[in-house]
Image (tube, grey):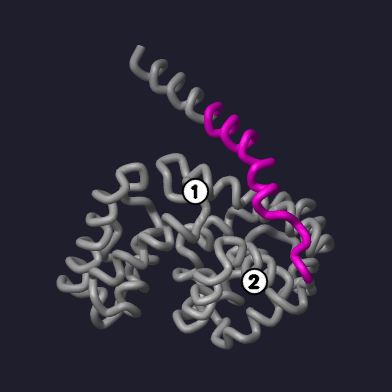
Amino acid sequence: MDLPRTFPGHPWLDTPEGHASLRRVLVGYSFRDSDVGYCQGLNYVAALLLLVMKTEEDAFWMLAVLLENVLVNDCYSSNLSGCHVEQRVFKDLLKKKCPRVHAHLEALDFDVSLVATEWFLCLFSKSLPSETTLRVWDVLFYEGAKVLLNMALAIFKMKEEELITTNHVGDVINIIQTTTHHLFDPDELLDVAFDKLGFMSTNISKERKKQEPAVMAELDQRFRRLNSSNLDDNN
């Protein structure tokens, strides 16, 4: 488990006591749902829940609610298929809501998963300031997983003019990371996500269903290639 790398330097989390508490929550959930077990990213989610909920039991049950009732299925499965589906849905939404940004990033051969994977797995807890993350989580618990897509779109929308002037993939990553790390005003992000982007007319559930076959085919192909490579190595 990546316990020492979870919010390093935090006065409580980055201590033997904090690591032990976080480990108990994560191991406890892995016993509850063996299909999920421990997945990269869950340590950040569980850690922030521990800080907010104060007790391990409350953090555990909030984590259970998140994974079982709020987020998409298979987001934290062994092949992360749910996360891959969200990435594809996000790319389509970016094309609809921010066509100029999408076109420019396509020209740069920039894959949005370079930044969005961490957002969707860590629920922005590793990217946004804690107070902003918690405001996002308030809406997430109330509105559901589609909120993560709203927030991701808003971040790109906020920096639209800067992004379309970039010439390199690294410049895009720098702009996005600098933006998220300095979003100390949650209202600024929420205003763009729910007002300036306009009504989300896309049926997200239908979009997810549409993307699932392509994702599963891609993951199956990747699995076959990996097995073939392993067989070659053993021969």
Residue at 64%, 79% in the rendered image? 190
Residue at 83%, 63% in the rendered image? 100
Mark 2 residue crowding within 10 angstroms, few (<14) / some (14–19) / many (20+) = some
**Up-down relation of residue 87 to residue 57 (above or below):** above
Q: Quadrant of the N terminus?
A: bottom left
> For numbered disc 2, what is the local secondary structure?
helix
Magenta stretch mostly in which secondary structure?
A: helix
Residue 140 x, y percent position in the rendering: 53, 69
Tag 1: residue type?
Answer: Asn
Residue 99 appears in view: yes
Tag 2: residue type?
Answer: Ile
Residue at 23%, 56% in the rendered image? 28
Question: Toward which corner of the image does residue 116 lie, by quadrant?
Answer: bottom right
Q: Is residue 210 magenta?
A: yes
Residue 64 x, y percent position in the rendering: 36, 60
Judge from the rendering whether residue 77 lies leftward or rightward of residue 10; answer left or right.
Answer: right
Residue at 58%, 65% in the rendered image? 148
Q: Which residues are magenta?
A: 199-221
**Up-down relation of residue 138 to residue 119 (above or below):** below
**Up-down relation of residue 45 to residue 214 (above or below):** below
Q: Quadrant of the C terminus?
A: top left
Residue 171 appears in view: no
